[in-house]
Amino acid sequence: MTQQVRRGYRSHRKATWAVVALVTVVVAAAVTPFATGASPKYYLLTASPAEVCFTGPGQVEEFELTLTNDARNNSLGSAEITAPGFITPTSLSGAPAGSSIAGNVIKLRNLATLLPTQGSAITVTVEATVLHADSGTWDSVAKQANDFADTPGPGNLFQLRGGAPTLTTAACNYVFVEGPVTAEKGSQQTVKVQLQAGGTAVSASGPLTLTALRNSTTLDPQSTYFDELTSSGQDATKTWVFSLTGNVSATGYALRAGTTTSTTFAIVDGLCQPNTTDPEHLASSCSLTSNFNSGFFESGVTINDHKLEPIAITFAEGEQADGKCEPWNRATYGVNGTTYTFPGVELDFGWGGGVLRVIYRVRNSEWVLTEASRGNSDIEICAGAKHGLDNEKNGDGSDPTPFQGKYGPAVWDEADGLYWGVLASVANPNKVKEDPVVCSVGNQSLPTGPNGASETWRAWTICIPSDWDWKNFG
């Protein structure tokens, strides 16, 4: 395993681009005798990699420097190699005792026993911090003296054969070439990342580990939220491929590679696919039941008249709506001294026109436990919604247009960018105009009990006209 690959395995959170140049071009040089008439003594110096992909300040790289004695009859005892000014050497390995780093100078000492004859060589590894993208050379001086002393006479100094090795750091960035996208909890999705320079994928060694974020905050521990955030290496197309699985339903997720952050996405409890084959916009439906509290005291949702983009469905803690819909006669119930509220439902979809029907439901066995003062005949649904097609109608736009709720116009919340209010009710769906409303109430019988047994659910149909995006809480 090369030093480059070994370093890639130690630095699990980054990958580095390296075009390795190990070929030394030997240029025939005219022999210019010293004043004493002594023949010059030659040495060779190579540096690898010669090109590094620069992804941001503070990037750490390893460089292999190979010093070769090319003198016929003399040992090479010491050398000083000055790194290009846009990198800062921080550590040295593989060098004899007495060697060190001073600023940008790598001081190699006590080399005579390692470089006694022509062709003998030593390779040292220098770890350095890359400061910015640039190009430069590894300048060097070599001497016969083991301690780099200036002994009498010109015979102590060696002469470099060929030019000084070069280093170029090219500006690069990570690019998410596929995904991430909104996906169901527990389902794998493919995410692909490349390291690119000027829009072209470049080779990199070692694994790449993504950082998972939610609302711009790094998740900890990340393994709780996502599986397979590390890809072992690039494939033949110079791409890291991840088989990512989300474990916690929530919105506002993003992934980061280096300094590049992906678009935001959600991990949802379910995806309701549209009816793409029915040109008359006939009923298309899907149903999902939340799994809060291990399946007890839950809610569910059924989507009807669905010919939109896929609808992402996420159940959320009802407490998210606290203080947003006053006055609000909320459904609560107690069991063994604990007060419960029904989970809310968050929907994410793209509008295609028409009216979307969302049936919000709770088990009748839980519904009858709600406080008697409610009468057990109705539910007040606190909803958060925004215009999905015309942002100027939202609260920070030029034509703010709230929906009309049971207690008046919905109130804009700058924190989450939604209008909030308790939904009004109409007698039937045909009376739905521009605002989301509860458009019917009834019961559903669903096989959600133990071993698929039938259960009765109390159901409220919410009619959502174009172009409202949606959250609701019972």
Image: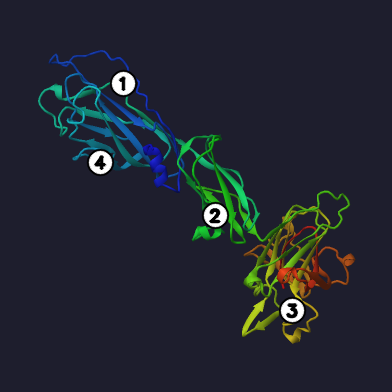
Q: Which residue is mark 2?
A: 227
The correct choice, above or below, for 354 with respect to 371 in the image is above
Q: CA distance from mark 3 to mark 4?
A: 75 Å
The amino acid type, in three-letter code, at marker 3 is Ser
* Nearest the eye: 366 or 71: 366
Q: How many marks can you see?
A: 4
Q: Quadrant of residue 68?
A: top left
User: Badges 1 and 4: C-beta atoms under 8 Å apart?
Assistant: no
The amino acid type, in three-letter code, at marker 2 is Asp
Q: Is residue 240 left or right of residue 280?
A: left
Q: CA distance from mark 3 to mark 1?
A: 87 Å
Q: CA distance from mark 2 to mark 1?
A: 51 Å
The correct choice, above or below, for 190 with respect to 37 in the image is below
Of the two numbered discs 2 and 1 on the same chain, state the one appearing first in sequence: 1
The amino acid type, in three-letter code, at marker 1 is Gly
Q: Which residue is mark 3?
A: 365
Of the two numbered discs 2 and 4 on the same chain, state the one appearing first in sequence: 4
The correct choice, above or below, for 158 with respect to 4 in the image is above
Give the SS element for disc 2: strand
Give the SS element for disc 4: strand
Across and down, in percent, residue 188 comes to: 61, 52
Give the SS element for disc 3: helix
